[in-house]
Image (cartoon, rainbow, N blue to C red):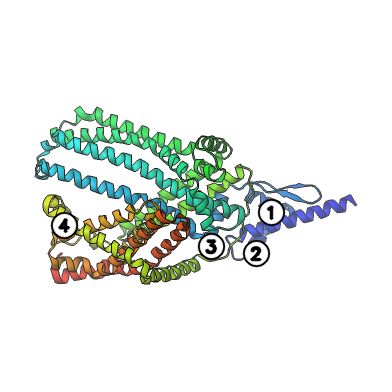
């Protein structure tokens, strides 16, 4: 009798292992049972019984057999490592692409740092022009580099820029964590994602997350003195042409930069679970750091796999990008878009699964069958409808008008700055009578891809930039206008029409719509935060809906615009 019971248990266990393997292979193969049977057949041909072959395949996949307890046959699931979690998260991306929003929300802080950095450069150039140093430097008078005013202006600019960068990076990481980790937790423990619930939960911790983000980026402040020492030494080397005398200073600056980089990496590793601990376990900053350390000790293998995978994917993307550039088909913007929007959030969501298991939480990894292309077409259609609705809704006319007015003001500012102060510099950047030689070296449609992915990413970030402050979309609008003003100042009206308007007549309205979406989100941020989650999702759809517009503009810019320049302006 006992033998029969043991036999039944063995059969039940084999069936359970078989079903779990089929469930696992279903993530990757259209016929998982057939794939499993082929594996079993190979092992049975090597002399194993079917049961032994089944156990061996199971051990190869999951690392160990599940333990059976009691007559009820309850199981204790083995913990899944980082790579297992990553394969699952990738398989569910088509059903829950909202994790990509976290990357674009994080990137919104780049709008502030970019605008402040740009204005700092303009301010420094204006001061140098007043001091008469710009003309001397451009004419080849290297002794102008020794003027103490030059280093003073640059020093102030780099210091302000460094502080702004550290603070903005901390805020960006806080926004990323607040929108990603709650989504990852519900996906991995409940098999679903509710974006509204996730954002509301994450933003309850936003201030402590900002403090954590700034803390993690503090080592970067060591780059400031290192950069200044190296810059001062380099300026003196060029001016005096005595490199040996300044080699020690250069090495000192490099040493500070290396130390800052090492501290940054070490702190990142030690605090790798800091943000998830704050959100998932509702811990204070100190408690979260202790939890990160203790969890790191339990999951060293997964963290190492995370780091190795990240390095490998970066190296692979770099090599592929370089190869295609050599072939005249650059794809760096496309690869960067995929890396930032899909790969990095998926990696961090997977590491969240490792953290949850280490903290004793059970996972519910449901299977979802939606294909990636079905998801893409579905989101593009929904985005186009949202964009059309946004543009045609009367209440949004104010945001669209304000966006246009700010860009026009930016054009006026850029035009005036160029004529009054910056013409000596801008004439070196914006050269009349010559087409960018880069255009001659690449395939037009590859160039269109690069332009499209760059502009689309900028538009998505602009649409979401209001999540920081209404000043963020305003800064984007001003910056685009100022740059356009610089171009307008260097060209005649006819040249401007030929070089900018063929694609600009389509691209600029797209940018105006994206900035208007950001302005609306910024207004909601200060007027009714309860609507923030829905508004984030709505503005993301608006930006997604701009894809056909921006793609059309990119194709025109890479093919028709250069042709018109050759025909009407005779530029070469």
Q: Position of residue 166 (x, y in %)?
A: 36, 41
Q: CA distance from mark 1 to mark 4?
A: 78 Å
Q: In the rendered structure, which disc, 1 or 2, sits on the residue that comes first in sequence?
A: 2
Residue underneath mark 2: 34
Give the residue displayed 30% in from the left and 49% down from the top. Answer: 114
Q: Number of numbered discs present?
A: 4
Q: CA distance from mark 3 to mark 2?
A: 25 Å
Q: Quadrant of residue 398?
A: bottom left
Left or right of 262 in this view: 429: left
Left or right of 64 in this view: 329: left
As drawn, the label of residue 95 is 3
Single out the mark in the foreground, 1 or 4. Answer: 4
Q: In the rendered structure, which disc, 3 or 2, sits on the residue that comes first in sequence?
A: 2
Q: CA distance from mark 1 to mark 3?
A: 40 Å
Give the residue displayed 29% in from the left and 29% down from the top. Answer: 252
Single out the mark in the foreground, 3 or 2. Answer: 3
Q: Are marks 4 and 3 in contact (CB under 8 Å)?
A: no
Q: CA distance from mark 4 to mark 3?
A: 47 Å
Outermost residue, front side: 527
Q: Quadrant of the C terminus?
A: bottom left
Single out the mark in the foreground, 2 or 4. Answer: 4
Residue underneath mark 1: 46
Residue underneath mark 4: 415
Left or right of 356 in this view: 18: right
Please indicate, yes or no, whether residue 570 appears anywhere in the rendered image: no
Give the residue displayed 41% in from the left and 57% down from the top. Answer: 524
Q: In the rendered structure, which disc, 2 or 4, sits on the residue that comes first in sequence?
A: 2
Q: In the rendered structure, which disc, 4 or 3, sits on the residue that comes first in sequence?
A: 3
Secondary structure beneath dot 1 equals: loop
């Amino acid at each position: 009798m006992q033998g029969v019971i043991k036999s039944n248990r063995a059969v039940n266990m084999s069936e359970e292992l078989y079903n779990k393997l089929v469930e696992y292979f279903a993530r990757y193969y259209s016929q998982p049972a057939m794939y499993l049977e082929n594996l079993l057949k190979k092992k049975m041909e090597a002399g194993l019984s079917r049961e032994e072959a089944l156990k061996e395949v199971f051990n190869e996949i999951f690392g160990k057999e599940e333990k059976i307890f009691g007559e009820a046959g309850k199981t204790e699931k083995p913990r899944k490592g980082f790579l297992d979690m990553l394969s699952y998260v990738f398989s569910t991306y088509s059903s829950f692409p909202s994790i990509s929003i976290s990357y674009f929300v994080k990137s919104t802080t780049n709008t502030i740092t970019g605008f402040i950095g740009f204005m700092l450069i303009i301010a420094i150039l204006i001061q140098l022009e007043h001091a008469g140093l710009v003309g001397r430097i451009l004419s080849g008078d290297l002794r102008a580099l020794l003027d103490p005013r030059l280093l003073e202006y640059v020093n102030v600019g780099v210091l302000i820029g460094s502080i702004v960068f550290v603070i903005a990076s901390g805020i960006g990481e806080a926004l990323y964590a607040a929108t990603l980790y709650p989504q990852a937790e519900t996906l991995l423990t409940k098999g679903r994602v509710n974006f509204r619930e996730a954002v509301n939960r994450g933003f309850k911790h936003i201030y402590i997350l900002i403090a954590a983000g700034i803390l993690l980026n503090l080592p970067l402040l060591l780059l400031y003195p290192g950069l200044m020492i190296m810059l001062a030494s380099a300026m003196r080397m060029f001016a005096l042409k005595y490199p040996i005398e300044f080699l020690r200073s250069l090495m000192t600056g490099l040493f500070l930069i290396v130390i800052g980089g090492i501290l940054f990496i070490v702190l990142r590793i030690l605090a790798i679970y800091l943000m998830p601990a704050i959100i998932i376990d509702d811990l204070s900053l100190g408690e979260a750091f202790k939890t990160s350390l203790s969890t790191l000790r339990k999951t060293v293998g997964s963290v190492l796999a995370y780091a190795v995978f990240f390095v490998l994917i970066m190296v692979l993307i770099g090599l592929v990008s370089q190869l295609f550039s050599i072939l005249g088909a650059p794809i760096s913007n496309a690869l960067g878009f995929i890396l930032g929007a899909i790969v990095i959030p998926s990696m961090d969501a997977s590491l969240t699964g490792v953290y949850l298991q280490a903290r004793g939480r059970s996972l519910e990894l449901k299977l979802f069958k939606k294909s990636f292309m079905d998801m893409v077409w579905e989101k593009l259609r929904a985005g186009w409808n949202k964009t059309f609705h946004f543009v045609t809704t009367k209440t949004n006319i104010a945001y669209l008008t304000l966006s246009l007015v700010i860009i026009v003001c930016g054009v006026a500012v850029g035009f005036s700055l160029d004529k009054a102060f910056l013409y000596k510099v801008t004439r070196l950047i914006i050269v009349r009578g010559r087409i960018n030689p880069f255009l001659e070296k690449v395939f037009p449609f590859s160039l269109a891809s690069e332009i499209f992915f760059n502009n689309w990413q900028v538009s998505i970030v602009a649409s979401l930039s209001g999540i920081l402050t209404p000043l963020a979309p305003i800064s984007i609008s001003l910056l685009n206008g100022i740059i356009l003003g610089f171009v307008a100042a260097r060209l005649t009206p006819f040249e401007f029409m030929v070089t900018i308007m063929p694609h600009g007549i389509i691209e600029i309205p797209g940018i105006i719509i994206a900035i208007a979406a950001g302005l609306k989100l910024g207004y909601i941020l200060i007027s009714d935060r309860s609507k923030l989650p829905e508004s984030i999702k709505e503005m993301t759809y608006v930006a997604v809906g701009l894809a056909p517009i921006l793609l059309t503009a990119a194709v025109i810019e890479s093919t028709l615009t250069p042709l018109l320049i050759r025909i009407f302006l005779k530029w070469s």
